[in-house]
Amino acid sequence: MSNDHHILSAFDRDLEAIQALLMRMGGLVEEAIREGARSLETRDVELAEIVRQNDKAIDELEERINHDVARVLALRAPAATDLRTVLTVLKISGNLERMGDYAKNMAKRTAILAELPAIDGAAGALRRMAVAVAGLLNDALDAYIHRNADLALAVRNRDQDVDQMYNTLFRDLLTHMMENPRMITASMHLHFIAKNVERMGDHATSIAEQVIYLVTGKLPDESRPKSDVISTLKPGAGA
Amino acid sequence: MSNDHHILSAFDRDLEAIQALLMRMGGLVEEAIREGARSLETRDVELAEIVRQNDKAIDELEERINHDVARVLALRAPAATDLRTVLTVLKISGNLERMGDYAKNMAKRTAILAELPAIDGAAGALRRMAVAVAGLLNDALDAYIHRNADLALAVRNRDQDVDQMYNTLFRDLLTHMMENPRMITASMHLHFIAKNVERMGDHATSIAEQVIYLVTGKLPDESRPKSDVISTLKPGAGA
């Protein structure tokens, strides 16, 4: 609406400041994912505690972003693309906050799993999954900053790899549980974590989809090929 | 800022229309939770399919709310409480969309569980949990419409009951798995669903907290007593 140069650049400055907070938040979440998974694999209870503590900073950044976005909306009354951008920031910070929560939850289980029998290969598989998700997040945020729809689309497609890793791990855990009831409790915890890492991947995908929407003005069609463990677990399902 | 009567009432009309969409969305989500759980308990695969199909309407409502909120922000440039209200609507519709997804996921597993051995009492316990969550959601939305912080606070406290129901069910499922490896696959599915119902309760709580923030201007302190199954599962944890 308002094409006054001064107003526009004031908005741009505000947006830049908010985006800097968003990137800082994204960096902290990425670190939490990587370190949370590392604490799990190395059974490093102290590192896990640091990850848990650091989640507070993530939550504070989200609150600050919410606050600053409300301020920009009230003060600058952005329209059209500017408005869409600000609302996208709001959604992305919500995604980041959830991912931070999942990372905290992963760290929380490190102390418990450290006292349970280890399950061959599971913690390593989880860490690889987490590293893949941290990579997705990194690229999704890059795609946001550079308004790069192609990169965002690639993130969306790569999320399938994470789903696949999850499916494999899920079946491994089931096998361990069937073969050795002593492994059931540890398997349940690991399975929880695996599901949460998979969900983090979904949030990274959601960020990528918002970037696609922001850049192209439309959402990618719904036919994202999602590897679905539910149907593969159906007894006797050959189809 | 703008105290022009005409502008104010135009905003109010817009807000009312958006709130009507939000309430319709809430009603659909509540139904999805109840019916999803009922389909699970009665092994009613057709009902489950209806729940899955209905999730599309929920997603469409969210998109429409997002769209209308952006329109109101652009057109009316609300400030202060009006702005806060609109941003709250946006957050609540996000919560509702997630809850709808969880309900759809629950329904999705009905067909699979219908072919697996039934676990005594588990589906009934799940349905009771789901009914409790649907009640929380109903009250949280009531609290929003009536700007009733007390009711919202009550919702927040009642979520503990859901957490408690989840903890009990989790332990029951563990026992079933340990005693009979044939029950492991069904238990894993039921456990998934239970965790998702518990998460729905968290979303209802999140709605309630937003209402508290909207009405009182501050978030309730962080000390929400959360029954936490993680620590209770710690081996040898007597404390």
Image (cartoon, coloured by chain):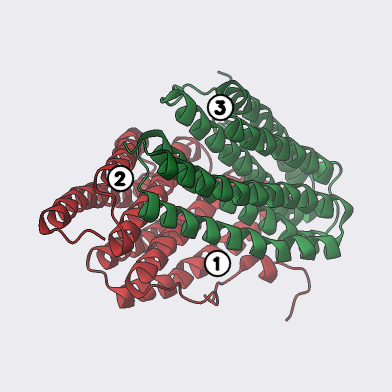
Chain colours: A red, B green
> Looking at the image, which residue is at 43% across and 57% down?
B71
Residue nearest the viewer, comparing B69 with B202? B69
Q: Is residue A64 visible to us here?
A: yes
Type of residue at label 1? Thr
Which mark is drawn over residue A19? none
Chain hosting mark 1? A
Residue A33, given in percent of the width and then of the height, sits at 36, 50
Q: Which residue is mark 2?
A: A69
Q: Is residue A124 visible to us here?
A: no
Q: Is residue A20 above or below residue A55?
A: below
Secondary structure category for the residue under label 1 = helix
Secondary structure category for the residue under label 3 = loop
Q: Is residue B13 above or below residue B39?
A: above
**Quadrant assignment for the C terminus of chain B:** top right
Q: In the shown orientation, is residue A147 left or right of residue B20?
A: left
**Which of the 4 image quarters holds residue A147?**
bottom left
Task: Please tell me how crowded label 3 is: few (under 14), some (14-19), or many (20+) other residues with Cα within 10 Å.
Answer: few
> Quick one: label 1 or label 2, which is nearer the N terminus?
2
Q: In the shown orientation, is residue A3 left or right of residue B101?
A: left
Type of residue at label 3? Lys
> Looking at the image, which residue is at 62% across and 67% down?
A229
Q: Which residue is mark 1?
A: A168
Type of residue at label 2? Val
Q: Which residue is mark 3?
A: B226
Q: In the shown orientation, is residue B20 left or right of residue B90?
A: right
**Which of the 4 image quarters holds residue A232?**
bottom right
Do discs 3 and 1 share a chain?
no
> Looking at the image, which residue is at 61% across and 24% down?
B157
Residue A184, given in percent of the width and then of the height, sits at 64, 46
Residue nearest the viewer, comparing B178 with B167? B167
Q: Are marks 1 and 2 in contact (CB under 8 Å)?
A: no
